[in-house]
Image (spheres, grey):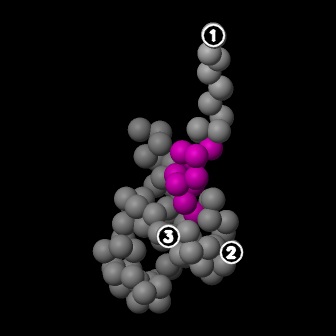
Amino acid sequence: MGDWMEVMIVREKLTEFRGERTQEEMAGLYGVSQQLWSKWERGACCPSPAMMKQLEVDTGIPMETLFFDAFNNQMELKDEPATKTTA
C-alpha cells in the first residue's frame, strides 16, 4: 500500500501544475489524449522520456520527482546487494 501512496503523492504534482486547466486542455498542449493525461496523473502509466523532460522543463520539477515511481524501480535494483556465487 505504501508504494501506491507514493505514486499518488508524486503524481499530485502534475495535478498542481495543471491548476485550473482541464485535463483536456493539458492534453491538447502536450499533443496527447485526455485519457492519457489522466493516466499520467493517476500513476497508471508514464510518458515517454522526451515528454518527461518537457514536463520537467515546463514545471521546473525534476522528472525523477514528477515520476518517482518510474525511477524508483531502477533505484531499487541498484540498491540490491549483489548475490555471491560459490564455485
Residue at the spot 43% in from the left edge and 46% down from the top edge: 4
Q: Within 10 angstroms of label 3, few (less than 14), some, or many (20 or more) residues?
A: few
Cα gap from disc 3 to disc 1, whole angstroms: 42 Å
Q: Main secondary structure of the magenta part?
A: helix
Q: Nearer the viewer, residue 49 or 32?
A: 49
Q: Which residues are magenta?
A: 66-75
- The residue that disc 2 covers is 60
* Residue at 46 percent of width and 55 percent of height: 8
User: x, y percentage for residue 10?
Assistant: 54, 58
Q: Position of residue 47 (x, y in %)?
A: 47, 69
The quadrant of the rendering that contains the C terminus is top right
The residue lying toward the viewer, choosing from 72 and 78, is 78
The quadrant of the rendering that contains the N terminus is top left
Q: Quadrant of residue 38?
A: bottom left
Element type at mark 1: loop
Residue found 39% across the figure and 82% down from its top: 32
Which amino acid, by three-letter code, is at mark 1? Ala
Q: Which residue is mark 1?
A: 87
Residue 35 falls within the magenta-colored stretch: no
**Earlier sequence position, callout 1 versus callout 2:** 2
SS of the residue at dot 3?
Answer: loop
Label 1 CA crowd tier, 10 Å (few <14, some 14–19, many 20+)? few
Q: What SS does tag 2 mark?
A: loop
Q: Residue 76: x and y, percent? A: 59, 39
* N-term mark: 3 or 1: 3
Q: Is 36 left or right of 30, judged from the image as shown?
A: left
> Residue 62's spot in the image, x, y percent?
67, 66
Outermost front residue: 87
Q: Relative to 80, does residue 83 appear above or below in the rendering?
A: above
Q: Residue at x 33, y 79 (%)?
A: 34
